[in-house]
Image (tube, rainbow, N blue to C red):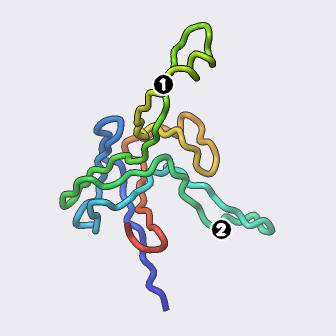
C-alpha cells in the first residue's frame, strides 16, 4: 500500500519584484526552504470523457516554477531560479552575421522572471501568463518525493 501525499496549495499573497513572490503558506503548512511550487492559472484545464463528454477532472496549467528561499509561520517567499546563458557578443553594424562571427562572444546569465517565456502544455494567452496576486500555487514533487 502506498501513502498518498497531497501537495501543499496556497496563493500568491504579494508580488515583491520581478523574480520574487510572497505566498500565503509557511511553516504551519509544512513549507520548507528549497521546496518547489508552480504558480498556476486560476482556471484549470478541464479534461472531458471522449464518450460521455463529462468533465473527468481539471489539471493545473503552470505559469512559472519558483523555489522557496525564506519561510515564516504563515508566509513564505519564493523566487524564480531557472537561468540560461546567452551570447550577446558581436556588433550591430551593417556587416551583420560576419561581424558577429568574428567578434568574441560575450556571455550573460539571464534569470527567468515572473513573466515566463517558457511554454508549458501550450502557449498561454498573454493576459494569462502574467503572475497576479491571488494566483493559486501548488507544490511540485520530483519522482514522487518532496524536493
In the image shown, does 104 or 62 lie closer to the viewer? 104
Q: Position of residue 71 (x, y in %)?
A: 22, 57
Please report the residue visible at 23 percent of the width from the left and 67 percent of the height from the top. 28
Q: Residues within 10 Å of mark 1 (few under 14, many from 20)?
A: few
**Image quarter for residue 15?**
top left
Figure check: 33 above or below 131: below
Left or right of 73 on screen, residue 51: right
Q: Residues within 10 Å of mark 2 (few under 14, many from 20)?
A: few
Give the Cα distance between marks 2 and 1. 55 Å
**Image quarter for residue 48?**
bottom right
Q: Which residue is situated farthest in the front direction here?
A: 102
Q: Which residue is situated farthest in the top direction here?
A: 94
Classify mark 2: helix, strand or loop: strand
Residue underneath mark 1? 104
- Looking at marks 2 and 1 on the same chain, the residue that comes earlier in the sequence is marked by 2
In the image shown, does 17 or 143 lie closer to the viewer? 143
Residue underneath mark 2? 56
Q: Position of residue 107 (x, y in %)?
A: 43, 32
In the image shown, does 105 or 88 lie closer to the viewer? 105
Classify mark 1: helix, strand or loop: loop
Q: Quadrant of the C terminus?
A: bottom left
Q: Position of residue 14 (x, y in %)?
A: 30, 42
Q: Position of residue 104 (x, y in %)?
A: 48, 24
Please report the residue visible at 49 percent of the width from the left and 92 percent of the height from the top. 1
Amino acid at each position: 500500500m502506498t501513502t498518498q501525499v497531497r501537495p501543499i496549495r496556497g496563493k500568491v499573497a504579494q508580488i515583491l519584484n520581478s523574480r520574487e513572490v510572497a505566498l500565503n503558506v509557511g511553516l504551519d503548512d509544512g513549507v520548507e526552504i528549497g521546496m518547489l511550487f508552480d504558480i498556476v492559472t486560476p482556471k484549470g484545464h478541464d479534461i472531458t470523457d471522449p464518450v460521455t463528454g463529462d468533465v473527468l477532472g481539471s489539471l493545473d496549467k503552470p505559469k512559472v516554477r519558483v523555489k522557496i528561499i525564506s519561510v515564516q509561520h504563515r508566509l513564505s517567499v519564493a523566487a524564480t531560479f531557472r537561468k540560461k546563458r546567452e551570447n550577446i557578443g558581436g556588433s550591430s553594424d551593417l556587416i551583420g552575421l560576419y561581424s558577429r562571427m568574428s567578434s568574441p562572444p560575450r556571455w550573460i546569465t539571464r534569470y527567468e522572471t515572473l513573466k515566463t517565456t517558457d511554454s508549458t502544455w501550450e502557449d498561454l494567452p498573454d493576459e494569462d501568463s502574467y503572475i497576479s496576486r491571488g494566483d493559486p500555487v501548488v507544490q511540485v514533487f520530483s519522482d514522487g518525493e518532496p524536493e
